[in-house]
Image: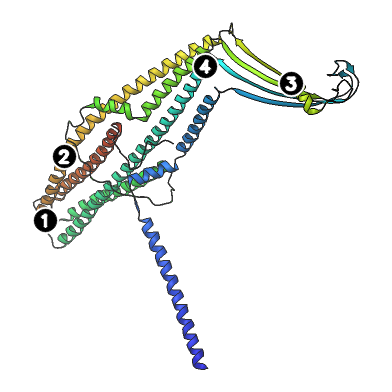
């Protein structure tokens, strides 16, 4: 019996150990999964997709577009005839006219009346057709404005994304320079102990190292600020970590490769949602003016109706009450007719609306022309800047390589006593500046290149940016 009890205890212990081990494994897996999730790096397309999904302005524009669509659909339905049905029940008290004899009686009685009416506008100065076109162009303009808003958000995210990448790359550069200074300081201290280097060299390196440490702190603060701004644009939780993924290499087009601004401008007029939205707004204002002019015309409508009723006092020749069904049949009446309305004088209200409509149309045309002019100058400026940046990037690469070699030579000469500390740091600063400039030019070129591609209608982002809201 004791052996059985001991075996049971051992079995229970083994099961408890297995459960404990399983729990530990689950905890490790959860922690590992959380760590992997925390280390996930966000690409530009992922940041843009998140921003578009969580942007409240886009949600508001979607609601506005839905309202515009319903207004447009109802404007089409307003051209259909209308039909009304009505019924009433009344109890008469005291003196009243008997509908059976048309005499005044002093009895209480009840009555019902029923009606069915309808009408159709035959002519209204083309107002309804123009109003339908007006609401259609307004709806189309809203759709294009939604697309333009999407593109604005995407480019704002892209701008802040590359801004954060710039400070991230710059932080790597200044950290590397600081680490080199720390290594040089350690080396000079050892040389000073054996009398190879002077005490002043140590003081000079310590001073430069302090400056570089301050630069690292400033760069870290700028990086934090740029990440925070990117989170704001994305509507990303502030407390969550956001690590960014470096973009792939981009081909630098030779200088002069973007010189044809005219062709890019023509493509932009065909593809840009902002241009399409303004074109649709211009058409809607033209139709609004046509609606105002329609008030000068007469209107003609067709109408008709069916009427019947039941009266409690209705009786036949023998004085017996007539049934409800027979009364509805006997009391039925029909009508049909035309209605003509001719505007004669409405205190010059129509004239004023037409005048205001013309002024609004002229204003929209001027704004559209001004927008297209500004767009052309922007494209021309981007083309020139891209050509210049392509040349600058090639030169910056050469300068970085040359400064890298110069610094390596200066470091060897310093070890041989042919260079002093100040000359070494001058060469080191030149290398750091060249690396920073190369990073800046690359990211700026990437931004402007994608902007030009967007103007040309090329796919810029991973998702369909121009889909309808």
Of circles 4 and 2, the one toward us is 4
Q: Secondary structure at mark 4?
A: helix
* Residue 274, position as x, y percentages in the image: 37, 28
- Of the numbered discs 3 and 2, the one sitting upstream in the chain is 3
Name the residue that disc number 1 marks: 415
Residue 78 — which label? none
Which residue appears at 72% of the width and 21% of the height? 307
Q: Secondary structure at mark 1?
A: helix
Q: Residues within 10 Å of mark 4 (few under 14, many from 20)?
A: many
- Of the numbered discs 1 and 4, the one sitting upstream in the chain is 4
Instruction: Quote the CA–CA distance across marks 1 and 3.
Output: 119 Å
Name the residue that disc number 2 marks: 394
Q: Quadrant of residue 463?
A: top left
Front residue of 374/338: it is 338
Tell me whether the residue at label 1 lies in contact with that at label 3, contact meaning CB atoms closer than 8 angstroms: no
Taking 329 as reference, is 461 left or right? left
The answer to whether residue 222 shows anywhere in this view is no
Quadrant holding the C terminus: top left
Name the residue that disc number 3 marks: 332
Residue 127 — which label? 4
Please determine whether, in this image, residue 96 is positioned above or below residue 143: above
- Of the numbered discs 1 and 3, the one sitting upstream in the chain is 3
Instruction: Quote the CA–CA distance across marks 4 and 3.
Output: 36 Å
Q: Residues within 10 Å of mark 2 (few under 14, many from 20)?
A: some
* Residue 313, position as x, y percentages in the image: 86, 23
Front residue of 175/235: it is 235
How is colour applied across the structure in the image? rainbow
């Amino acid at each position: 019996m004791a052996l059985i009890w001991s075996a049971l205890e051992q079995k229970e212990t083994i099961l408890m150990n297995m459960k404990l081990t399983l729990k530990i494994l689950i905890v490790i897996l959860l922690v590992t999964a959380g760590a992997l999730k925390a280390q996930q790096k966000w690409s530009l397309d992922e940041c843009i997709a998140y921003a578009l999904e969580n942007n409240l302005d886009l949600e508001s524009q979607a609601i506005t577009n839905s309202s515009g669509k319903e207004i447009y659909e109802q404007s089409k339905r307003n051209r259909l005839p209308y039909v009304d049905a009505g019924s009433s029940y009344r109890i008469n008290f005291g003196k009243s006219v008997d509908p059976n004899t048309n005499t005044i009686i002093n009895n209480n009685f009840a009555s019902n009346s029923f009606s069915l009416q309808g009408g159709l506008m035959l002519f209204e100065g083309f107002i309804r057709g123009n109003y339908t076109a007006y609401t259609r162009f307004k709806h189309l303009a809203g759709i294009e404005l939604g697309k333009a808003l999407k593109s604005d958000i995407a480019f704002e995210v892209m701008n802040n994304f590359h801004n954060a990448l710039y400070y991230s790359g710059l932080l790597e550069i200044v950290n590397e320079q600081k680490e080199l200074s720390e290594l040089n300081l350690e080396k000079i201290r050892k040389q000073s102990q054996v009398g190879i280097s002077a005490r002043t060299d140590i003081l000079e390196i310590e001073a430069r190292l302090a400056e570089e440490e301050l630069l690292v702190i400033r760069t870290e603060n700028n990086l934090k600020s740029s990440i925070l701004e990117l989170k704001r644009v994305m509507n990303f939780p502030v407390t969550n970590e956001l690590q960014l993924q470096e973009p792939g290499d981009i081909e630098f087009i030779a200088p002069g490769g973007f010189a044809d601004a005219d062709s890019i401008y023509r493509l932009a007029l065909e593809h840009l949602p902002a241009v399409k939205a303004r074109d649709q707004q211009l058409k809607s204002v033209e139709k609004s003016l046509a609606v105002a002019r329609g008030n000068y015309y007469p209107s003609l409508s067709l109408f008709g109706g069916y009427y019947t009723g039941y009266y409690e006092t209705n009786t036949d020749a023998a004085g017996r009450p007539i049934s409800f069904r027979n009364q509805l049949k006997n009391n039925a009446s029909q009508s049909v007719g035309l209605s003509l309305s001719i505007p004669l004088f409405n205190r010059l209200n129509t004239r004023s609306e037409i005048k205001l409509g013309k002024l609004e149309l002229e204003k929209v045309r001027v704004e559209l022309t001004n927008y297209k002019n500004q767009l052309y100058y922007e494209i021309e400026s981007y083309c020139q800047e891209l050509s210049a940046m392509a040349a600058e990037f090639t030169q910056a690469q050469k300068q970085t390589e040359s400064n890298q070699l110069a610094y390596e030579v200066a470091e060897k000469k310093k070890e041989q006593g042919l260079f002093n500390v100040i000359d070494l740091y001058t060469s080191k600063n030149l290398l750091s500046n060249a690396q920073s400039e190369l990073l800046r030019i690359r990211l700026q070129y990437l931004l402007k290149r994608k902007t030009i591609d967007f103007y040309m209608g090329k796919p810029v982002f991973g998702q369909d940016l121009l889909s309808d809201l």
